[in-house]
Amino acid sequence: MGSLRTKFDLVSGLNYTKYSRKVSSLRLERIQKHLEKINKPAVLTIVSPDGDIIDCVHKKKQPALDHPLLKNHKIQRVAPEMPKVKMLKREEEKIDSKRNEGEDFVWQMWHRNGTRCPKGTVPIRRSTTRDVLRAKSLFHFGKKQPTIIDPTSRRADAPDVVSGGGHEHAIAYTGTSQEVYGAKATINVWDPAIQEVNEFSLSQIWVLSGSFDGSDLNSIEAGWQVSPELYGDSRPRLFTYWTSDSYQATGCYNLLCAGFVQTNSRIAIGAAISPVSQYAANQYDITILIWKDPKLGNWWMGFGDNNLVGYWPAELFTHLTDHATMVEWGGEVVNSRANGKHTSTEMGSGHFAEDGFGKASYFRNLEIVDGDNSLSSVHDISILAENTNCYNIKNSYNNEWGTYFYYGGPGNNPRCP
């Protein structure tokens, strides 16, 4: 499947040619310096079948610890206190949609050849000069453009708005009046088609605090994304993000800057997820949990069945040092309106919410963590899609999936010109 996919990228109409232009030696030198800073010396290097290079880096040498606020940071060694589950999870444990978390993480492509990172190291996807050249500039490499949506102040039936920088969403969200200490969901994984190299399609959880209209919004994010600009291909990849100043200068994707402390030796953030869901066939999903350790205050990320990936140290944040005020779950795409038309970049599976299971993408078992570190199903959620002719969302509740929703769409179509 690997080589087929690569070939597909070459003929999928994604135009990478402008990224192979001549580059000044000064710029190359700067890029080289930056890569030396973030690509740490490896104890072992694993070449993935999809072309990724995974470096197994000693835990204490990882990029996170270069952060000025983490100069004296000791990596948290005591496992965080896992959130308690408020009620018995009835059938939920039985229905993991054709995914067996116990399969020793075969779901990341770099595991295919059976090589693992040694104990005491963490797997880090190596960045290349080519990766940086696809970004707008060295400063923009690994960063989201500022795109802040305050769902509480937007009309859900807004016309064809281009919300912040051409970003469009289909999300569910909680109110802002409560104190939230984490969020969880199981997210269906697809490989949506992307029209332009600088567009992306992602499905994620946002844990937020601070003001949407100021420069102090704190956000912790995790999910899967397809981003040709960031990764150089069209595969869905596990990703994380953080910012403490509304996406202006702080934070980045994955481990592309100092900040997120990785503790897991088997999960590579930024690596391709495999297998992915197929239309009217097998469905695959990933479970993501983000929560604040009540003892030390760091924000942890769990993946699958209680596998700890790592944490965002409390020192990185202002508002989130205390608690979150809002959680959002859902999809986001970039609509660059190439040639004046709405993008045909797909969200989710590329199918509208009403197509349902096996066709539309879903988030299920939406939960939040409260002040006493307990997980409970979210009952009070609102939904928003800026342009329902392009992408939409429909939520519901049942005993098996708790609070869930279907979402997504094809983008450009006769009703979304």
Image: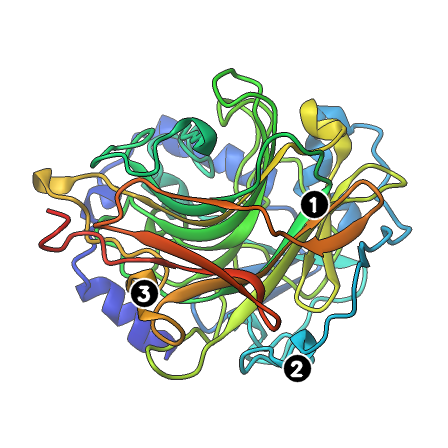
Q: How far apart are marks 3 and 2 (CA)?
A: 25 Å
Q: Is residue 292 left or right of residue 274?
A: right
Residue in the picture at 66% in, 82% down: 94
- In this view, 170 is above or below 187: above
Quarter location, residue 74: top right
Q: Distance between the residues labelled 3 and 1?
A: 29 Å
- Specify which label sits upstream in the sequence, 1 or 2: 2
Residue in the picture at 69% in, 76% down: 93
Q: State the mark number for residue 323.
A: none
Residue that extends furthest to the top in the rendered view of this protein: 214
Residue in the picture at 27% in, 34% down: 158
Q: Residues within 10 Å of mark 1 (few under 14, many from 20)?
A: many
Amino acid type indicated by mark 2? Lys
Q: State the mark number for residue 94.
A: 2
Check the image and tell me how it is coloured.
rainbow
SS type, badge 1 = strand
Q: Of circles 3 and 1, which is in front?
A: 3
Q: Of circles 3 and 2, which is in front?
A: 3
> What residue would you read off at disc 1?
182
Q: State the mark number for residue 354.
A: 3
- Label tally: 3
Q: In this view, does 38 lie to the left or right of 131?
A: right
| Residue 317 seen in the current view | no
SS type, badge 2 = helix
Horizontal and vertical percent position of residue 104: 68, 78
